[in-house]
Structure formats: structure tokens, C-alpha cells
């Protein structure tokens, strides 16, 4: 049978109230008494009822993580980063897969509030006004990962998606490519990813190349999009390079090209985005924009824990550095 | 300000006790009153305090998931399977990464108990006696995924690892290969994975081939192991095929072989294990044992929820079917 607070008080020869004061770290207990109580706690293996205490303190030491889908390769490393930091500060994470479905997201936010999580990390392709309104209504401490609300009210962690896409496209231009295709999310998407198209467009225009609608293919950030895009694009013009807004698209596209007897990088240069673990194992190894996924998760969690404990954030919007990793999917 | 139970009672024109009876689904409330209460709840957007209720019911509708590492490609799909089922039955999951570290696992189990989770899904390469003892001591409802305790006390979900490895090795033998190497976990490992070696050994012996120590390389189930193994093995004998106990090993090995000018499947046949998403994107696409990872998670969660609700399990040890997926890493 587990030891109770009463057992600890008896063992230490003090009152229950004194044990409670020690547990709650109230500073009026003298050191000697405190020591006795802590020894008794250790000896009896006493563990306070966290749930009962949560009701009193209104803190559960639990944080909700709202992501589209943990089986999408992009999220596991971010989640790992969040959990490692949570663990250091004695928090646990409650993982919710929303499939970017608005109703599911709303339901999760309500459930997380009911379960009295201390805060929420929100990652989603879209950031609908309804979600922002609900976060406000529920008074949930929230940090956004990989997206930013237009009004800039909620703290966020991102990379500079536009600048990264610009660099990737310029890298292709510098190699002498003239007909550079784009495969990825459309320009008008309500999320950080649409900035990748914006970066591509800017690079093309700035370099004096012609922006051709027929070299653009818009779709989800999945391998399937890469396959579909190649079927459509390859008839067009003489494409010599492709900027893909995700590694999965890039891998799908490269496999599709290989199926048509077109080799990467011999015939076409390809650059991806994200630097998934798979990107370095794929053949050819992908040249890609490396996002610091683990760090995005850990930085966001640190910010959230500060927020929960009413500490000042050094920065409200954290933009982490990215790098362009050169591997084998572009000609040397 | 959120509506309280008092507001609901006032709105419905009933007592607080009546509202409570409706909320707790006690059947003594007449239908008309019940309807009034439910309408009031809906109108006011009232949400009962789940944490307070948890203390009373001793149920939190939360389940702990203990895995080695969510950023290992094997786990995200399993976790997704668990969460989808949890969601259907109104449970949430608390995700814990243990790195298969014994102390970390013990600490997580204790914390999960303190946070009053209703049950735990435990996945880990090892299943130390200390862990089994702690699970028993804490009286945690537990289902094992991908492992089995030797005494068979805890419910579990696995595939038949030995039989799968036997099939994979026989597949290589049937193609006329004579010098079949093994790269994977050692035979004496305390986990389900060691059965993969056992299956390999049995297939080699049954077929009348010679079991050669020099064709074995033991290590972790990572890509790095594949690279290291090729450095050692390739000097030996004239290897014509390799059975790898994980896809990551297989991909590492194939890349290492390519680096040495040896092609798969032209020169050497390779079979992997797991069927990660990457296996179908890799070049060459991997022939591998496909584990139903999503199903393992969802079946385990269904079992656990039954256990929590004191329902009979149809089967205590669930062995899910696997298949050998033929792709391009073996000669046709």
C-alpha cells in the first residue's frame, strides 16, 4: 500500500500541514524540520497525489502538442525536441494528431483545456481565425511552431521560409540552369509554406529569368505530388532543374524521372526542403534546405514553459537558422 | 467566464444534484428532465471539470505510451495507430521517449502512475525484470507492443518475428544464393528482435547450407550498422545475399555496397525488415518483411481500453500477420 501524507507526518514527527508546506516549497519551514520531512518522504517512498494537487495549484505539469500527423516524417523529430525539454522541467506531453482538420483541432483544444494542460504547442499547416479565437477564449498558453499568426499575437518559432526558398532557387540559378520548375504548395496557402513559393518567384524574377506558369505544379507536400508533377511537367519546355518545397516531393519526382530514363543530377538538378533523415539515405542523396527540426521543438517548449511560469520571453518570434546542405542531387 | 454546474441547474430549472446525475449517466433521471439538462448544457457551453471528476472516478481518460524514441522511423506509425483508437474512445495519450534507458523507463512509469493514467502501452527493445516488477507494483494496466514477457503475464501484440525472418532467408535461398550474410541484433538479445537471428539460423540449417560465423554481423538496428557491416563482411567469402534485421540496416548496407561499386540487386540480393515508408522510396525499392505497424498500435490500444474497462480480451497475445513485400532489391 502506498504511503500517505499522514504516514510521512508520523514518521517525521511533524504535522500534516508541515509536510504540505515542505511539499509546496513554502519557505516558512526551518531547515532541520525540512530535512526530517524529506528523509521521511524518501524512506517511505511517498509520492504526493499529483492529480489532487493539480486541482489546488491549477497546474498539471502537462502540455498538449497539436500536430497534423506524427506519421508524417516531418514531425517526429520536432516532437522529440519538445519532449526532451519537457522532461527536463518535469512536464509530460499529450500528443494529438489533428490531420489539420479544423473540427478535430477545435475538439482537441477543448479537451486539452478540460484536462487542464498548462499550455499548448500548436503546429498546423493552416491557422484559421476560428482556432486563434478559440485559443484566446480558452485562455490557453500557446506557442506556434512552423507558423505565425498574421497579427503576431502568439509567440512562434519558425525559419525564414521565403529566404530559404530564395537561397535554394538561387543555388539552382548559379549552376547555370535556365528552366527551373517549382513543385509545392500554392502561393495563396494560408501558411508558412506558401512563403516557399514566394521565395522561388522572387529568385526567378530577380535573376532576370522568365517566370513561366507552365513550370509550376501546386499540390500537397507529399511524394505523390512529385510523381504527379513529373507526369505533367516533363512534356513542357526543357526543364533543367526543379525546386521542390519538400524532400518528399523531391524524392517522388526523382523516382518518377528515373522511371522515364531521366537521371538526377546528370540530366536535371533537384533541390528539396526540410532535410528529413531520409534525405541523406536516399539515392542520390538530396541537396536540400535543412530545417533544425529538433531545435524548433525544443526552443518552442522552452518558450512555452517560460510563458507558463510568467517569465519574460527574450523574443516573441524566434527565427531559427537554416542551412542549404549540398549533397548529390545537383551537378557538382 | 465559463459556465458552472450551478448555471446549468438554474438554466434547466433543476437541482445541481440532478445535473450531476445526468452527467454521470445515472439512470434515475426521467427523460424529460434529462433533455432539459442536456439542452442547458449545450446552450451554456458547459464543460464539466474533468480533473475534479478524475479524482472521484479514479479515471483520467489518459493513457501513457512508453517508446524508445519517436524520431526512430519505426514508432510514429505505431503511435498514430494508438492515438486514432484512443481518440475514438475519448482517451488522450501521453507520449514518453525512454531511449530504452532503464532508469528513464522507471521514472516515466512512476510519473504516469502519479498522473493517474488509466493504462500504459509499453514498447521497448528490452523488457527488464525490474520493469515487469515495477509495472506489477504500481498496478498499471499494461499492454506490451513488439515484445513479450517470458512468463506471458502481460497482454501483448507482436508479429511472429522468427517465422518472418525464416521466410525472408528462405526467399534468398530459393533464389539460388549460397553465401547469405546476416546483419542485425545478436542472438542473445533480451527481446523479440533476437528471434530474427533465430529465424535466419533455422533457415540456413534446414536448407543444408553451412552456417558461417564470418557471415554474421551483430549491431543495432540502424543504418550505421549496415555501413560498418559491409566494411567487415565484404572481404569475406563471396557473399551473394544479405538478410538485414531492419530496413535501416539494409539501406545503410546497400549505400555502402554502392560506394564500393557493388550493385543491388545485380551483384547481391538484399532483404530488409519492417517496411518503413522509406523502404518504398529508397533506390532500389526494398524487398522487405512488412510489419503492420499502424495495426499493432491500434490493436494494442483496443486491448488496453478493454483491460481498463474490465472487459475480457479475446486473446491475450495477439500475433498480427506480416507479409514479404517483393520489390527491387533482389534479382527477379
Image (cartoon, coloured by chain):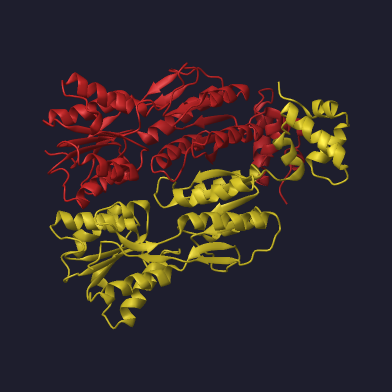
Chain colours: A red, B yellow
User: Quadrant location of residue B35?
Assistant: top right
Q: Residue at x 21, y 38 (%)?
A: A270
Where residue B246 appears, x then y in whole percent?
A: 35, 59
User: Quadrant location of residue A315?
Assistant: top left
Let me know if residue A250 appears in the view. Answer: yes
Where residue A84 appears, x then y in whole percent?
A: 46, 38
Where residue A55 appears, x then y in whole percent?
A: 71, 32
Left or right, B191 with reference to B313: left
| Above/below status of B44 relative to B163 | above
Q: Which of B283 and A307 lies nearest the eye of the viewer?
A: B283
Q: Residue at x 21, y 54 (%)?
A: B255
| Above/below status of B328 relative to A159 | below
Let me know if residue B106 appears in the view. Answer: no
Left or right, B282 with reference to A190: left
User: Quadrant location of residue A242?
Assistant: top left
Total marks drawn? 0
Q: Which of B229 and A34 lies nearest the eye of the viewer?
A: B229
Please state, as top left, top right, bottom left or bottom right, where the C terminus of chain A lies in the image. top left
Where residue B198 appears, x then y in whole percent?
A: 38, 72
| Above/below status of B65 relative to B38 | below
Left or right, B332 with reference to A83: left
Amino acid at each position: 500500500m502506498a504511503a500517505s501524507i499522514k504516514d510521512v507526518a508520523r514518521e517525521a514527527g511533524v504535522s500534516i500541514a508541515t509536510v504540505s508546506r515542505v511539499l509546496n516549497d513554502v519557505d516558512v519551514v526551518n531547515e532541520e524540520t525540512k530535512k526530517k520531512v524529506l528523509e521521511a518522504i524518501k524512506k517511505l517512498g511517498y509520492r504526493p497525489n499529483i492529480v489532487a494537487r493539480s486541482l489546488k495549484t491549477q497546474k498539471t505539469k502537462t502540455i498538449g502538442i497539436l500536430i497534423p500527423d506524427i506519421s508524417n516524417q516531418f514531425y517526429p523529430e520536432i516532437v522529440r525536441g519538445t519532449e526532451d525539454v519537457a522532461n527536463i522541467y518535469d512536464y509530460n506531453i499529450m500528443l494529438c494528431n489533428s490531420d489539420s482538420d479544423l473540427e478535430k483541432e477545435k475538439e482537441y483544444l477543448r479537451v486539452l483545456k478540460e484536462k487542464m494542460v498548462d499550455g499548448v504547442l500548436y503546429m498546423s499547416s493552416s491557422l484559421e481565425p476560428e482556432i486563434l479565437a478559440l485559443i484566446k477564449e480558452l485562455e490557453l498558453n500557446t506557442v506556434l511552431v512552423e507558423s505565425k499568426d498574421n497579427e503576431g499575437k502568439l509567440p512562434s518559432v519558425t525559419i525564414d521560409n521565403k529566404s530559404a526558398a530564395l537561397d535554394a532557387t538561387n543555388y539552382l540559378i548559379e549552376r547555370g540552369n535556365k528552366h527551373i520548375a517549382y513543385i509545392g504548395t500554392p502561393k495563396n496557402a494560408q501558411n508558412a509554406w506558401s512563403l516557399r513559393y514566394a521565395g522561388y518567384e522572387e529568385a526567378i524574377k530577380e535573376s532576370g529569368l522568365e517566370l513561366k506558369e507552365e513550370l509550376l505544379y501546386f499540390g500537397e507536400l507529399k511524394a505523390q505530388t512529385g510523381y504527379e508533377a513529373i507526369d505533367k511537367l516533363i512534356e513542357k519546355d526543357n526543364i533543367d532543374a526543379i525546386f521542390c518545397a519538400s524532400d518528399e516531393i523531391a524524392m517522388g519526382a526523382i523516382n518518377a524521372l528515373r522511371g522515364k530514363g531521366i537521371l538526377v543530377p546528370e540530366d536535371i538538378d533537384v533541390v528539396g526542403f526540410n532535410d528529413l533523415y531520409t534525405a541523406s539515405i536516399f539515392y542520390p542523396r538530396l541537396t536540400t534546405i535543412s530545417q533544425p527540426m529538433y531545435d524548433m521543438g525544443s526552443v518552442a517548449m522552452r518558450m512555452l514553459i517560460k510563458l507558463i511560469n510568467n517569465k519574460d520571453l527574450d523574443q516573441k518570434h524566434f527565427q531559427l537558422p537554416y542551412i542549404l546542405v549540398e549533397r548529390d542531387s545537383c551537378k557538382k
